[in-house]
Amino acid sequence: MRRVAMVFLPSLCMATHAFAQPLTGAEAKDLLFNADELVVAVNPAAELSDKDRNTLDILVESNGFGYYGAISFAPEEGLLSESLQGAFNFHSVEDANAAARAACEASRKPDGSPCIIAAQLLPQRWRPARFQLSQDATRAFEGYLEEAGEKALASSSTTGAFAVGTGEDAESTALEECNARAPDKDCVIALRN
């Protein structure tokens, strides 16, 4: 079941997606969050009205956006403007922030103020962790754990792309499938068993 709640975001500084060595499934299991619930964390610096917050809530709920996500807009243009842009189902909130801001900057009026983050989509009970996966990848992780034998999960740090490979070519299969989905072809092996 999906639950959306409005909360205040204490800081926009979060943990990073980068990891040096692939983790095992057992190591990742303790770091990942429930894939069924998310929280909309509103940035107090965005100074959104109650109506704007309600709009964000409806936007997230009606579109089924997943974590990690971010919604950005140009304050001078208002929330309901062409500058309103989002990035959803990324593997870290930092990557979602960067993508949402870049899309907003490309869409805002050239003479206006810079874009800011209005809200972030996070797993419920989120806390900084050294390993994160998007909501969809976290769901796929449940199947990953059940697979016997060699397996690998590859993920992109600039998108929500991921893929699972099994068998003796698990790593190369996961990388190839993930890179086919990632425009920057930046996938790396995140999990290996």
Image (cartoon, helix red, strand yellow):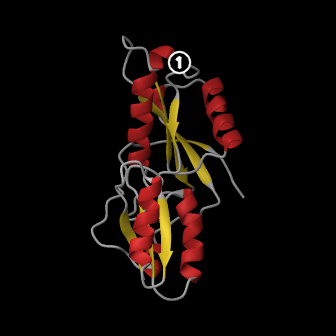
Expressed as whole percent of the image width and height from the top left, the position of residue 190 reads 39, 69
Q: Which residue is mark 1?
A: 78
The residue at the point 68 percent across, 42 percent down is 61
Q: Residues within 10 Å of mark 1 (few under 14, many from 20)?
A: few
**Rendered view: 71 above or below 147:** above
Q: How many marks?
A: 1
**Of residues 147 and 11, which is closer to you in this image?**
147
**Rendered view: 52 above or below 157:** above
Residue 28 location, quadrant: bottom left
**Rendered view: 176 above or below 146:** above
Residue 127 location, quadrant: bottom left
Can the viewer see residue 44? Answer: yes
The residue at the point 51 percent across, 45 percent down is 69
The residue at the point 61 percent across, 45 percent down is 65
Expressed as whole percent of the image width and height from the top left, the position of residue 32 reads 49, 67
Expressed as whole percent of the image width and height from the top left, the position of residue 8 reads 52, 40
- Quarter of the picture containing the N terminus is bottom right
Q: Amino acid at mark 1?
A: Gly
In the structure shown, which secondary structural element does the residue marked by tag 1 occupy? loop
Residue 2 location, quadrant: bottom right
- Quarter of the picture containing the C terminus is bottom left
Can the viewer see residue 29? Answer: no
The residue at the point 57 percent across, 56 percent down is 124
